Each structure stands twice: as C-alpha cells, then as structure tokens.
Amino acid sequence: MNQNQYKIQQEILNHWTDQSIRLCSAKFPPLIYPDLESRDILFIGLNPSIAESEEKKYSEIEPSVDALAADQLEQWRKHRHFQPYHDLEEYLKERKYPITWAAIDLFLDRETKSKVLLNAIRAGKNLTSEAKVQIEYAKKFVEIAAPKMIVVASAAASHILRDELRGCSCNPLPCLSPKLEEDGTYRTIVNNQKNIPVFFSAMLVNGALDAFSRERLFLHIAKTLCPKKSLPK
C-alpha cells in the first residue's frame, strides 16, 4: 500500500487506542484496509460486521496496520459478504472487461447489528464528532482508490451519502448530482476527476438484494463501464 494510506491507517490505530474516534465496538480493532490504490470499482458499505465465531480472533489479533490489512485482504478473498463482488468481477471478465475492485466502509467499528451502529453515530439528528471523523477518513480512502466507478452496497450508507451528507464538505462523494443522470447513475467527483458514476443499492448478498435485481445491476454496471461495447449475454 502507498505511504499515504499506511500513514492514515496508523493514525486511525493511534486514535483507536486513545478511544477518541470509537463509536460502539470497544473490544475489537478498527477496520484496516489492504492496498486501495487505483481501482476500477470501489464498493462502499456501512461498517464491518463481526460474527460470534470471529470475536476471539479479533480480540487477540495484533493491532497493527500490517496484520489487520492482511486479515482484511483474506476477508475480501473468502468471506461470503464479498462473494457478489467476485461474481461481478467474473461477469465482467466473461464480457471481455476485466476489472480491479476494493471495498471500504463509512465507519470502522466492528458491529453486526446495524441499529446499534446507526444509533451510535448520531446525537439527536446530527452526526457525532467521532462519526464525522470516521467519514472524513472514508473520504480519504475514496481519493486513494481513485475509482472509475463507485457502488454503495448498503441501503443505510446510501441514505447517509445521498441524502444526509449532500452538500457537506465531509461527504466522500463530493458534488454528488442531485438526481439520476440520463444513463441511470448519479455522478460525483474524485480527485478533480468529474462524472464518476455512482450506484446506490442495498447489500448485494442474496436476501438483501434479490437475484433479479442483482442481475440488472450487473448489466447496468457493465453498460456504464463500457457504453460503446457490445456485451455478449
């Protein structure tokens, strides 16, 4: 990973130790990413969940950038939550459009119950200062990834980014278009690169998004990435 990303993630770990940016998961280390640089598609979720079977591992894992990044890379490769991203990668590869992808979350606390996390990020109707700091980090990670396309794969994260943070300087999707463009996407700016397509969706795993909706989303993504290319079925 580049030095800028490493430095940011070391800063996150330092703040985690002094508890200044934690929201709700005091027992576990924060989400730390492997290399994010130069990705075709960046997926954005709400926060990392943690199963009971994983609690012991994350209670004992070395709280270092290298160890946590290596663990997250393994999660990308094997965890069922990320299987739809591999499915999309294979779908595009079969259509002669190979891609690279990465996944980040708006918030870094490991918490399975989304209601607990969503309650922890707000004081009344406003985001807490800790939540805003974590979102600022998410914005930096979007800039490091410099994606050609963004897929927000969480209904809650979609509402926060599209509605709650619209026009806010901390929004990881700055200058987000106020309505759908003619091609059925929203548009944002990343590193002064305009018109980056954005898709808002529920999680792509079955149960959150039905198979037919996911099929349509995959086709829409393919046509947006390569609009002039004939896509075999």
Image (cartoon, rainbow, N blue to C red):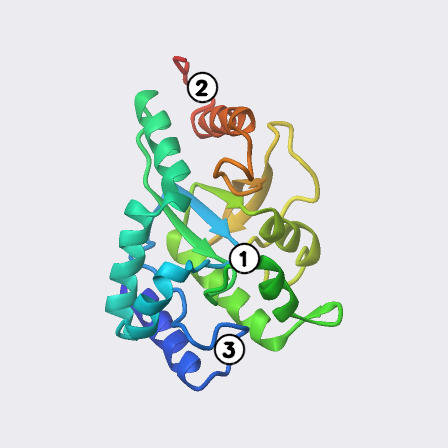
Picture disc at residue 228: 2
Q: Earlier in the sequence, mark 1 or mark 3?
A: 3
Secondary structure under the numbered disc 2 in the rendered image: loop
Q: In this view of the protein, which residue sits in the foreground, 193 or 103?
A: 103
Identify whether 69 is placed above or below 194: below
Separation of marks 1 and 3 at Cα, in angstroms: 18 Å
Circle 2 packing at 10 Å, graded few (<14), some (14-19), many (20+), is few
Query: Given the image, on which type of amino acid does mark 1 rest?
Result: Pro
Residue 39 drawn at (x, y percent): 35, 45
Residue 139 drawn at (x, y percent): 50, 61
Cβ atoms under marks 3 and 2 closer than 8 Å: no
Secondary structure under the numbered disc 3 in the rendered image: loop
Query: Given the image, on which type of amino acid does mark 2 rest?
Result: Lys
- Please name which of the two marks, 3 or 2, marks the residue nearer to the observer: 3
Q: Residue at x 75, y 67 (%)?
A: 125
Specify the farthest residue to the front.
Answer: 53
Q: Which residue is under mark 3?
A: 21
Secondary structure under the numbered disc 1 in the rendered image: loop
Q: Which residue is under mark 1?
A: 172
